Image (tube, rainbow, N blue to C red):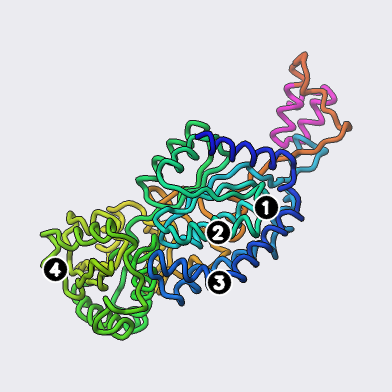
């Protein structure tokens, strides 16, 4: 705890100096972050391979390229983000002018996750830097190679007096959470999210919680079947072999349409990953034995084990489980209760598409929801009725690449959002500022209060200008 307290104290000294508030400091750190990525791409890919056997293409597409895009947007837009926003004023305070001034919150703690350990560490750091904060980054110990790389690279490229990396496990995280922060940003499970929120509550520290949930995919029979299958497979198994908070968690479709969809998914999976997907170099491995055991427990559930219609192969030594389809798992089975976070995909069949909305509505609000349809009426119905952190029509996962959209959860799937300007705002306070001179001082607002003064104020606030004139002159408006 003493070490954590010392780190925070040093960071607060830096923040108090005012150094991080300037445009020059922020832009320099953002450019250095871009340089860090550009000069160490191979090292980042290697670390991700060591941690989770992530394919190089996925490492670049889903982590490195997104960090570069975040940096570019922040560098391009920083001046406009920092500029005060002029807003209207009211007659009550005439003459005056008003603006909203974004200011940094102060010392921010960022606790990242293991599944996208580079992206989920550096993306919120970019937002915190852009907003002018000092930062402690706590990478996930479950991805030790990436954690070690970040601890090595960040002091080489960024201001070590303002941006620090603290490695470690539960003890170190607990010690950090005991400190007073001005912002805590956490990515991970809802279970740990509750612990983080409880720790933040002791100091009334604002939090952003990027959690997860069971992300549904609703598929109606009007779709382009081949494209739909490709996009579901890419969003599920092409997203870290299902180990992603926005990966499809289950499909709902009509019973009569399910055989066609299942055949399309099987054909696509074989085309992408071959007849023996456990040996595929294009699939990430399960992160560790604990998660492997958790996933096999979902598969071995007696309510589910006889409903596997594709895949199910596993190799504990390699920490690999093949892409697996499960048909009509009961709603009270473990696979339909827990967030799967792996390569298993249940397919639930219904008689009417309206039943799909009932099923989704009966579960906790997900981080993402997907619908595939050519039916515009049904599309509007899903968008209007399904509550989720984000929604994507006729694709999966790609909404997170649009920095104009906020990324975050609702209810059990999270609190707050980020990406693009939303990252800047997540680490900023919008300070309301009203400017007045010494002219136009309304004496009616001051004691001693009289009926005439009350009439003046009442007419002013109600916009009754004729009555205001009468009150000023002391006339009875009636």
In the rendered image, residue 392, in percent from the top left (x then y), is placed at 43, 68
- Residue denoted by label 4: 307
Q: Which marked residue is nearer to the observer: mark 3 or mark 2?
A: 3
Label 4 crowd bin: few (<14), some (14–19), many (20+), radius 10 Å: some
Q: Are marks 3 and 4 in contact (CB under 8 Å)?
A: no
The answer to whether 206 is drawn above or below residue 447 in the figure is: below
Tell whether 181 sits left or right of 316: right
- Residue denoted by label 2: 122
Residue at 29 percent across and 80 percent down: it is 269
**Viewer-nearest residue: 148 or 202:** 148
| Label 1 to label 3: alpha-carbon separation | 21 Å
In the rendered image, residue 444, in percent from the top left (x then y), is placed at 79, 23
- Say which quadrant the C terminus sits in: top right
Q: Which secondary structure class fits the magenta region best? A: helix
The secondary element bearing badge 4 is classed as: helix
**Viewer-nearest residue: 450 or 79:** 79
Residue 279 sits in quarter: bottom left
Magenta span: 454-478
The secondary element bearing badge 3 is classed as: helix
Q: Which marked residue is nearer to the observer: mark 2 or mark 1?
A: 1
Q: Are marks 3 and 2 in contact (CB under 8 Å)?
A: no
- Residue denoted by label 3: 41
- Residue denoted by label 1: 159
């Amino acid at each position: 705890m003493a070490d954590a307290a010392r780190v925070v104290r040093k960071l607060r000294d830096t923040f108090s100096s005012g150094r991080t508030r300037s445009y020059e400091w922020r832009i320099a750190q953002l450019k250095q972050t871009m340089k860090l990525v550009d000069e160490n791409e191979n090292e980042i890919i290697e670390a991700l391979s060591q941690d989770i056997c992530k394919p190089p293409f996925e490492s670049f597409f889903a982590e490195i390229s997104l960090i570069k895009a975040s940096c570019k947007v922040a560098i391009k837009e920083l001046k406009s983000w920092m500029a005060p926003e002029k807003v209207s004023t009211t007659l009550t305070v005439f003459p005056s002018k008003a603006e909203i001034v974004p200011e940094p919150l102060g010392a921010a703690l960022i606790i990242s996750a293991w599944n996208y350990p580079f992206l989920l560490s550096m993306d919120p750091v970019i937002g915190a830097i852009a907003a002018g904060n000092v930062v402690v980054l706590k990478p996930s110990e479950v991805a030790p190679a990436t954690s070690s790389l970040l601890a090595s690279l960040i002091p080489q490229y960024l201001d070590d007096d303002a941006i620090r990396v603290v490695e470690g496990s539960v003890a170190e995280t607990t010690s950090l959470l005991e400190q007073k922060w001005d912002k805590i940003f956490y990515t991970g499970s809802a279970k740990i999210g509750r612990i983080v929120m409880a720790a933040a509550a002791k100091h009334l520290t604002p939090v952003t919680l990027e959690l997860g949930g069971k992300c549904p995919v609703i598929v109606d029979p009007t779709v382009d079947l081949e494209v739909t299958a490709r996009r579901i497979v890419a969003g599920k198994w092409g997203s870290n072999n299902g180990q992603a908070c926005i990966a499809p968690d289950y499909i709902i479709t009509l019973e009569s349409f399910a055989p066609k969809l299942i055949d399309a998914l099987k054909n696509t999976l074989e085309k992408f990953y071959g007849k023996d997907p456990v040996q595929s170099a294009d699939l990430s491995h399960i992160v560790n034995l604990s998660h492997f055991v958790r996933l096999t427990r979902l598969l071995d559930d007696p309510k589910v084990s006889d409903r596997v219609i594709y895949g199910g192969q596993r190799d504990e030594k390699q920490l690999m489980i093949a892409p697996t389809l499960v048909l009509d798992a009961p709603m009270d089975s473990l696979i339909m209760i827990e967030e799967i976070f792996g390569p298993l995909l249940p397919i639930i069949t219904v008689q009417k598409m309206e039943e799909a909305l009932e099923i989704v509505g009966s579960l906790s609000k997900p981080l993402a929801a997907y619908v595939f349809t050519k039916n515009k009426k049904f599309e509007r119905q899903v968008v209007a009725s399904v509550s989720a952190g984000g929604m994507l029509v006729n694709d999966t996962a790609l909404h997170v690449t649009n920095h104009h959209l906020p990324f975050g959860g609702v209810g059990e799937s999270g609190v707050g959002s980020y990406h693009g300007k939303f990252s800047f705002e997540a680490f900023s306070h919008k300070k309301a500022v009203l400017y007045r001179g010494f002219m136009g001082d309304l004496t009616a607002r001051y004691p001693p209060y009289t009926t005439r003064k009350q009439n003046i104020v009442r007419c002013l606030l109600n916009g009754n200008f004729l009555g205001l004139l009468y009150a000023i002159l002391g006339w009875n408006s009636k």
